[in-house]
Image (cartoon, rainbow, N blue to C red):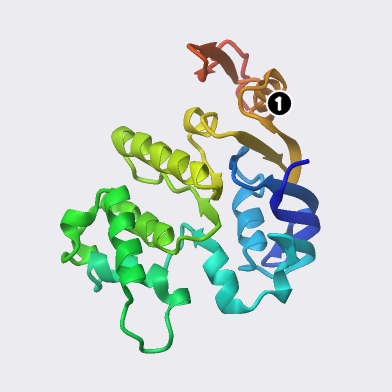
């Protein structure tokens, strides 16, 4: 029987009085990388925010076997790390200072960073290849470079569950490949990774895939499963094909599907 790191039962969430999640039930396997995909407006980002307690919601959420609302706030922040699209502005801070923010749940008020904090920050910066910029202001960096710094901040938490909403935004192909390697390394350490991805080719490199549509979980299964590949085709209106090449699933656009002008 699989251990479950994060679970939602009958989860309902709205944004500006619009119901986005009408009662989704889903679970994420511990020590596994699950990619969350689906068409625009499927509710992917809303689901992740609700799971992390960042949106008001109804229903039951469990983190590591305990109801989310019952966690002490500091301890929950140690166990569950979040990387979103709307991270607070950190332009005036140095790269090292931003990454150190990831260690706040582990520090006492106004305390000096410990050796463990420094080690976690150094590891995170090297993992994301931002160590050479440690003294630079984040505002001086490009959008892709900034995204790597924010990823390093999330990694520095050293949480047991890492949740990310579109972490590959603005990253070029080499750094997308590096990101995949980092995620694989985390999973080997027993970390649970959950990531919303628009890059379907990268999403298929995960262990499991959650496919969403209209606020519902349409399919959850192994990324190398033919059933998952077919569910992915269905979710995207049959406009793609999935083929296996050297043991890796490949996504191909299917331009043969007829379209009709309005």
Which residue is the extreme one toward the bottom? Answer: 110
Label 1 SS: helix
Which residue is the extreme one toward the front? Answer: 115
- In the picture, measured across the screen, residue 140 lies left or right of residue 215, that is left
Figure check: 220 above or below 44: above
Residue drawn at x 61%, y 22% as measured from the top left: 224
Figure check: 212 above or below 55: above
Residue placed most toward the observer, 61 or 254: 61
Residue drawn at x 55%, y 57% as measured from the top left: 160
Whole-percent x, y for residue 4 in the image: 71, 50
Figure check: 239 above or below 213: above
Judging by the rendered image, the residue that carries numbered circle 1 is: 231
Residue placed most toward the observer, 91 or 128: 128
Which quadrant would residue 136 be assigned to in this image?
bottom left
- In the picture, measured across the screen, residue 199 lies left or right of residue 92, that is right
- Quadrant including the C terminus: top right
Residue placed most toward the observer, 176 or 21: 176
Whole-percent x, y for residue 53 in the image: 64, 68
Residue drawn at x 70%, y 68% as measured from the top left: 68
- How many marks can you see? 1
Q: Are there few (<14), some (14-19), or many (20+) residues within 10 Å of tag 1?
A: many
- In the picture, measured across the screen, residue 60 lies left or right of residue 137, that is right
Which quadrant would residue 58 be assigned to in this image?
bottom right
Whole-percent x, y for residue 260 in the image: 63, 20
- Quadrant including the N terminus: top right
Figure check: 119 above or below 237: below
Q: Is residue 119 visible?
A: yes
Residue drawn at x 36%, y 89% as measured from the top left: 110
Q: Is residue 90 visible?
A: no
Whole-percent x, y for residue 87 in the image: 43, 65
């Amino acid at each position: 029987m699989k251990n479950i790191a994060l679970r939602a039962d009958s989860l309902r969430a709205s944004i500006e009085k619009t119901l986005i999640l009408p009662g989704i039930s889903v679970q994420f396997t511990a020590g596994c990388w699950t990619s969350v995909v689906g068409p625009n407006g499927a509710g992917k980002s809303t689901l992740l925010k609700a799971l992390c307690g960042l949106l008001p919601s109804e229903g039951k959420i469990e983190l590591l076997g305990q109801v989310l609302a019952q966690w002490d706030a500091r301890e929950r922040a140690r166990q569950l790390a979040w990387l979103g699209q709307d991270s607070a502005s950190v332009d005036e801070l140095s790269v090292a200072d931003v990454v150190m923010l990831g260690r706040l749940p582990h520090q006492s008020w106004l305390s000096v960073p410990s050796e463990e904090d420094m080690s976690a920050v150094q590891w995170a910066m090297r993992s994301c290849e931002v160590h050479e910029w440690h003294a630079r202001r984040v505002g001086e960096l490009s959008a892709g470079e900034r995204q790597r710094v924010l990823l390093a901040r999330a990694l520095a938490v050293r949480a047991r569950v890492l949740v990310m909403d579109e972490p590959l935004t603005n990253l070029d192909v080499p750094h997308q490949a590096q990101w995949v390697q980092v995620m694989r390394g985390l999973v080997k350490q027993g970390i649970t990774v959950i990531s919303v991805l628009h890059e379907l080719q990268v999403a298929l490199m995960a262990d499991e895939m959650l496919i969403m549509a209209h606020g519902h979980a349409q399919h959850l299964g192994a990324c190398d499963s033919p059933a998952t590949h077919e569910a992915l085709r269905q979710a995207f209106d049959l406009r793609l094909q999935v083929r296996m090449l050297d043991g890796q699933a490949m996504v191909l656009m299917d331009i043969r599907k007829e379209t009709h002008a309005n």
